Image: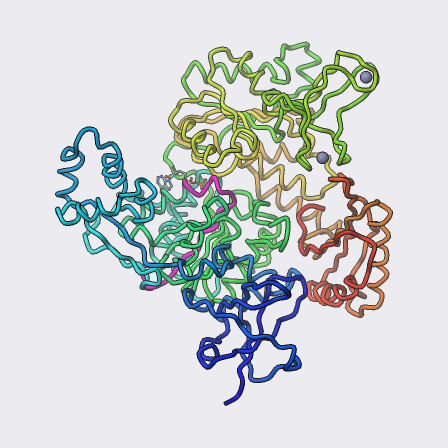
Amino acid sequence: MNEVFVRVALDHPLPTLFDYRCATPEMAAAAVPGALVSVPFGKRHVVGLVCEVTTHSDVPAERLKAVDKFCTACPPLSENWLALAAFAADYYQRGLGEVALPALPQALRDTARWSRLFAPEERYRLTPAGRAALPDALPARASALRKLAQALADSDYLLAADARALHPKALPTLDTWQSSGWVELDVIEAAAVPAAVAAENAPAPALPTLTDEQDAAVEAIRDADGFAPFLLHGVTGSGKTEVYLRALADILAAKPAAQALVLVPEINLTPQFEAAFRARFAALDSSAIVTLHSGLAEGERARHWFAAHSGRARIVLGTRLAVLASLPQLAVIVVDEEHDPAYKQQEGLRYSARDLAIYRAKQLGVPVVLGSATPSLESWWQADQGRYKRLTLSRRAVADAVLPTVKLVDLEEERRRGRASFEGLSGPLVAALRARLERGEQSLVFLNRRGYAPQLACDACGWVAGCPRCSAYVVLHKPERALRCHHCGWESRIPRSCPECGNVDIAPMGRGTQRVEESLASAVPGARVLRIDADSTRRKGSAQALFSDVHAGEVDILVGTQMIAKGHDFQRVSLVGVLNADTALFSHDFRASERLFAQLMQVSGRAGRAGLPGEVLIQTRYPRHALYHALSRHDYVGFASATLAERRDAHLPPFVYQALLRAEGRTLEAALAFLQQAAAELTQIPAAARVTAYDAVPLTIVKVMHVHRAQLLIESASRAALQATLRAWQPLLRGLKGVLRWNLEVDPLDI
Ligand code: ADP
Ligand code: ZN
Ligand code: ZN
């Protein structure tokens, strides 16, 4: 019999596969592409992914090592999935293993846990008899047992593992209750068949009558044949979620095992979506809907991943990492808020989940829906070209809900006329906030800067508190009484006096959310002010609690960063105030205005959703700026065409394709020298004739954690030429020395 070898992808920067022997016939039989293996690598044993199985290896026999074992708990990944990982690796210039292995749940990459993974789930359920008997049948002082009974009563079922965590003797107790007929035990095989519709005739929830536009959109998606990319352009509050729900319901009903993938840009938006999907798909077994995001505990994430991989989960709801989930029966993909920069991973494999979603849909020949009130200009341009089909929702779905009126507060004018203001809050904004408080309506104040003040400065000598490790100012955080670097996390106490000249009059300059929170409390007496930003939500789950306070009406004024701008369906907000938006108008980043427009449109969209007339006040020094003008007319289309025309004239994306080479060195000179050599290497590459390389430049924040950073931008009108150049460039770059690190980013968002 021929010997069998496997070629394995490992999480290693070398873009090659590693060959191993199968030592036994059992192993040879288990060797299939997509299987997970444990293999010796150097002094360690690591988990890899079998990509090929062959009967020949070029590695000399004495150097070939044998596979330790195959992972039998996990069925192999599909050929389609391997092809997706291979595409992502090739497109983003990474090794296959560097893409494929991090895409798997961490628990799968630990061989010690293999045998325990995906064991059948044991679920205890209260019977109607149990519901009637418990907890009254229990002795009053048996508080542990009462807790157990409560846990059973609180949800559909209780996992054996969770019961054991509640009380060490929970399982014997549950066995006793089972013999009393109070609970029932279901054993769910992890690799079970796709979750089926529950047998009981679950009452269908009352569905809203679709608007004509929603109806047309649902029909187009449902009737799509093969690969069909849709751009669902719907103004805020137009009911895009309802379109996803209906289209998915139709597609999932039509194919008994079909799976749907729904992507949202932020973890904070998953609970709202999950609730909507669970309510709508109440007839599906509750394990048929799973979430995938970085907030899940490891074991939970592995179980959810496996539900998707085994085909049990019919709907997977997740953040960008979910785009690489294994979904053998994937039949439709939704990317909500497709313009959101959060879909771009900013470290490691720097992929765009939106772009991979489109590739995936094309690979499988299924529809993909990109939804947004402010589509990315890339997607808008694809639709202009007829490559994506545009679906439009031009009105708000709820009867009476109209788009809010947008007003600009001219700060120069306010100042010239000597009108009163309250620490950066203009008179008109304060008056509007007070009026909302009197009427019992909610307001939202948005600014994109957290902390108390972005700088702490000395008036006498001009000193500004800076980070010792970065070329950046540190931000004053008042509640924590700290100066904090937002780039590296460095922290120190607030000095009592200027370290340069001893002056005790050092003062905060500029405003962040903490300071605005303070100003609001004094400008609008009696208002309950709540701040939501990365600082106030640091604890796991706290964002959820804060958002529910808003929904419950326990908050009058919500102040925060972009976290409050996205997607939330606030029913009682009738006023939105925007501070400090101007800085983005004159940024050197050509995408800044697109991002600002989207952000302001999103945050404005939180106002007036449920019939209360909504109002948006934007404080600005440039009330005549074209961006604000378009915003006040809710004119995304006009803004998009004007901006695309500018981009075309300036040869910017989407009219060219870009890649960035970033280098980090001990000195700026070293980083720049590396990039200059890298640029010189381009002359050796034939495809680079169609590629333009710009000068190497320092990054805006040039030093972070004592490391100096610089970048080199290359671009081409031909995506193929750019890709060919990158492919040929990589090995040459590996030969260059002199920097600590370098990386390539394809389709960068921040330049
Ligand atoms: P978007 O995501 O487009 O901003 P949502 O999906 O959050 O909008 O919908 C806004 C509101 O409109 C929600 O409260 C939703 O329940 C409601 N809604 C959606 N479609 C309809 C409809 N056809 N009739 C009545 N209300 C609807
Ligand atoms: Zn000083
Ligand atoms: Zn720092």
Q: Is residue 741 above or below residue 266?
A: below
Compare residues 37 and 554 and report the one nearer the observer.
Answer: 37
Q: Position of residue 41 (x, y in %)?
A: 61, 66
Q: Is residue 613 left or right of residue 410?
A: left
Q: Is residue 377 left or right of residue 259?
A: right
Compare residues 641 and 252 and report the one nearer the observer.
Answer: 252
Q: Which stretch did the figure color magenta?
A: 253-272
Q: Quadrant of residue 331?
A: bottom left
Q: Is residue 456 above or below residue 5?
A: above
Which quadrant does ligand 1 occupy? top left
Q: What residue do we see at 41% from left, 16% from top?
A: 439
Compare residues 282 and 111 and report the one nearer the observer.
Answer: 111
> Does 501 appear in magenta?
no
Q: Position of residue 449 (x, y in %)?
A: 63, 29
Residue at the limit of the structure toward the bottom, as seen here:
1
Q: Position of residue 456 (x, y in %)?
A: 72, 21
Q: Position of residue 238 (x, y in %)?
A: 43, 41
Numbered-mark total: 0
Compare residues 536 and 602 and report the one nearer the observer.
Answer: 536
Q: Is residue 469 left or right of residue 608?
A: right
Q: Is residue 96 above or below residue 514?
A: below
Q: Is residue 38 above or below residue 593?
A: below
> Does 269 appear in magenta?
yes
